[in-house]
């Protein structure tokens, strides 16, 4: 199987996964209003046209973004661009690098963009993203649409929120494209902390293994796919979770809610040094139980 084909497979997996994203159910209006006044909480609303609406300035420190959308599906993502690298350049590099698999563009994008996490949200749900942001200039995007109107600039300035990161389960990326061995079991709902202690960009994907299948079956499927033999995968791409992209050294927390059971923890970010091969096909997957 060619690297390009593997990359395309990773993309198709993401498209399928996007339909099964879980989030908290939108609460009563009164509850929502109370939450908006809580320290370190920022409400984000995304329009049907994928425009992100949020305050122009927020405080530094830990913030929990509570994201709702009028679109069927939105991919909320925080990004910071290096000085001299424009939003138009980023959009062009996303198109060439991530959608057309051009490695020069992907490398330029990764060298100039810090990815601060995100959360996928479906209409009628609330996506929650907790992240510690230093003062600076950022964009909040709906990556369902790669165009300037889907990116909203905001500033982080002023006094620290004083808020702390939420508790809950956590997973950790290490080395270059590996998952830390533990924990073997996490909660099936709540806030999932993702610590990127590696030197590459990653995002968390959880896929539910089909009944009777194990991580060894998944490993065999990956090996067969690498040899060009595309059999049916042993995991259900319609039952899972995928979070936003996180740069090295960053920690984020996202809400999730999935059926209990055995899952595969993986990452499909394309590796520019491997011709765009998704990290999962470089071995960035392992079994994990949700209970
Ligand atoms: Cu990765």
Image (cartoon, rainbow, N blue to C red):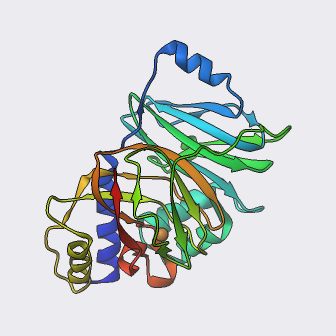
Between 40 and 57, the residue placed more toward the observer is 40
Extreme residue toward the bottom, this view? 227
Which x, y percent locates residue 89?
Answer: 62, 61
Identify which residue is drawn at 54% across, 20% down.
32
Occupied quadrant, residue 230: bottom left
Which x, y percent locates residue 274?
Answer: 45, 83
User: Position of 277 compared to 138: left or right?
Assistant: left
User: Position of 209 compared to 199: left or right?
Assistant: left
Which x, y percent locates residue 216?
Answer: 24, 76
Residue 81: tell me if it is visible.
yes
Which x, y percent locates residue 279?
Answer: 42, 74
User: Position of 212 compared to 266: left or right?
Assistant: left
Identify which residue is drawn at 24% across, 72% down.
218
Occupied quadrant, residue 41: top right
Extreme residue toward the top, this view? 30
Residue 75: tell me if it is visible.
no
Q: Quadrant of the N terminus?
A: bottom left
Q: How many marks?
A: 0
Extreme residue toward the right, this view? 158
Between 58 and 40, the residue placed more toward the observer is 40
User: Position of 179 compared to 251: left or right?
Assistant: left
Identify which residue is drawn at 45% across, 64% down.
183
């Amino acid at each position: 199987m060619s690297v390009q084909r593997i990359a395309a497979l990773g993309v198709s997996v993401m498209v399928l996964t996007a339909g099964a994203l879980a989030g908290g159910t939108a609460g009563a209006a009164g509850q929502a209003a109370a939450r908006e006044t809580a320290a370190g909480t920022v409400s984000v609303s995304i329009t049907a046209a994928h425009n992100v609406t949020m305050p122009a300035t927020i405080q530094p420190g830990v913030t929990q973004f509570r994201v709702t959308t009028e679109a069927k599906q939105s991919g909320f993502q925080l990004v910071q661009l290096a000085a001299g690298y424009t939003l138009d350049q980023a959009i062009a590099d996303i198109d060439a690098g991530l959608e057309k698999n051009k490695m020069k563009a992907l490398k330029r994008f990764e060298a100039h963009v810090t990815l601060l996490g995100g959360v996928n949200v479906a209409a009628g749900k609330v996506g929650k993203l907790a992240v510690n942001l230093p003062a600076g200039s950022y964009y909040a995007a709906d990556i369902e649409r790669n165009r300037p109107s889907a990116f909203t600039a905001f500033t982080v300035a002023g006094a620290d929120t004083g808020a702390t990161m939420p508790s809950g389960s956590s997973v950790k990326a290490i080395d270059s494209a590996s998952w830390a061995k533990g924990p073997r079991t996490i909660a099936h709902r709540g806030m999932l902390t993702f610590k990127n202690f590696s030197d590459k960009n990653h995002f968390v994907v959880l896929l539910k293994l089909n009944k009777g299948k194990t991580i060894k079956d998944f490993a065999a499927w990956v090996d067969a796919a690498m040899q060009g033999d595309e059999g049916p995968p042993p995991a259900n791409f319609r039952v899972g979770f995928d979070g936003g992209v996180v740069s090295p050294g960053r920690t984020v927390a996202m809400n999730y809610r999935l059926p209990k059971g055995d899952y595969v923890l993986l990452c499909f970010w394309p590796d520019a040094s491997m011709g765009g091969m998704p990290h999962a096909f470089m071995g960035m997957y392992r079994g994990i139980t949700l209970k």
